[in-house]
Amino acid sequence: MNRYKVAIIGCGRVSEKHLKAYSKLKDRIELVCVADTNTEGAKKLLAERGFVGVKIYSDYEEMLNTEKVDICAITVPSGLHYKIATFCLNKGLHILLEKPMTMSSSESKELYELSKKVDKKIAMGHIYRYFPIVGILRDDLASGSFGKITHGTICVRWGHGQDYYDSAAWRGTWKSDGGALMNQSIHAIDLLLWLMGSKAVSVNAKLARRLRNIEAEDVGMAVMELESGALAMLEGTTATLPSDKEAMFSIFCEKGSVSLGLKRGKPSLNIRNEKGHSMNFKYIRKQLSKGGFKSFSYALNPHTGIYADLINAIDNNTQPIADAYAGFTSVDTLMGIYRSAKEGCSVALPLDSDFASTDMQNFFEKV
Ligand SMILES: NC(=O)c1ccc[n+]([C@@H]2O[C@H](COP(=O)([O-])OP(=O)(O)OC[C@H]3O[C@@H](n4cnc5c(N)ncnc54)[C@H](O)[C@@H]3O)[C@@H](O)[C@H]2O)c1
């Protein structure tokens, strides 16, 4: 079995989850080098996590022109994703790209198309697709076990205080981050649409900035109509208590319902059949027989599941579970949400022209 050589660009908060994944997947992954403009921070992080002999660069281009790697993890501020991912794909590397894929619909489409052209994988950091039971539910919803899907909701109440936003200049800016929907909720939108097995064809949205001193939204709500005729609703916010983080989705169907979530780090599950009986244990058993105990451990660090899936996709020349297309469609939907809030009307999806999060500049100053 190949051991893939990996590089990381960006050694901040989320890169720790990547390092944890490498520790779990040592037989398949070797971290060779990292690049960060803050080399001291990178050095400290690697030492704390017990990674020795990893080369550290301040310039990612110099690193990738020097080192030979197979996979590059891109974990820099979101506004840099497009430029760095383009560079990596053109270098012939598979990438694990953090969410959101890019900050505009056209850039995401370009990356998706470039990955096909150069025949390299993009695995998106859409962690929710990698939680246990989610994949099985997706198959059962798609095969019609739950009957017709009427509607779905997702709420991401991922409280962050002002200290989080003040910890780095890029956080909460339209150019480099976006707000609670673009940063904290984009992978939740992806999850809901993926589970409901349909594309959004129109969206109505509202944004607010209630508590945090940032450029972008700290509360956002959207109602989407799907191609199937089902409706989907999103609530995303960082203006809730940081100590009471919660992410929860529910899907309602003709023959049952499905709810899955995390509250204060504890998972919750409520799967019902058409008689109202709980099917929780049936699904826990299904997950155990499909992926064993190991697959439940991905709930603790979904990035381990993302890397395991990317390795499998490279080995077998298949697509990762959260692939480049998922990256593109979720950004396109999110940009539709932003455009709807800006224009104050329903917006058709997919977008018929480019929209970028910088098009929201001064949005709250004008409302
Ligand atoms: N999938 C998830 O669960 C998840 C969770 C958190 C963050 N994220 C995403 O990960 C990305 C990074 O977020 P974070 O919270 O780790 O940010 P962070 O600010 O903590 O880390 C970013 C790092 O990138 C470095 N950097 C900046 N410019 C660089 C450049 N040109 N070259 C090399 N390094 C550079 C910074 O010095 C910093 O160390 C964002 O896109 C965010 O949306 C994903």
Image (spheres, rainbow, N blue to C red):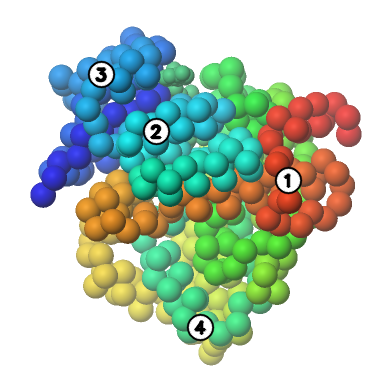
Q: Looking at the picture, which amino acid does disc 2 mark? A: Asn
Decide which of tag 4 and tag 2 comes sooner along the chain: 2
Q: Looking at the picture, which amino acid does disc 3 mark? A: Thr
Q: In the picture shown, does residue 128 fall above or below 259?
A: above
The residue indicated by pointer 3 is 66
Pointers 2 and 3 in contact (CB under 8 A)? no
Decide which of tag 2 and tag 3 comes sooner along the chain: 3
Decide which of tag 3 and tag 1 comes sooner along the chain: 3
The residue indicated by pointer 1 is 353
The residue indicated by pointer 2 is 90
Residue 157 in sight from this viewpoint: no
> Could you tell me which secondary element the residue under label 3 belongs to?
helix
Q: Looking at the picture, which amino acid does disc 4 mark? A: Gly
Q: Residue furthest top?
A: 40
Rounded to the nearest angstrom, the CA distance separating label 4 from label 2 is 41 Å
Q: Is residue 236 left or right of residue 3?
A: right
> Could you tell me which secondary element the residue under label 2 belongs to?
helix
Quadrant of the frame with the C terminus = top right
Decide which of tag 4 and tag 1 comes sooner along the chain: 4
The residue indicated by pointer 4 is 144
Decide which of 188, 269 is in the foreground and name it.
Answer: 188
Residue 335 in sight from this viewpoint: yes
Pointers 1 and 2 in contact (CB under 8 A)? no
Rounded to the nearest angstrom, the CA distance separating label 2 from label 3 is 15 Å
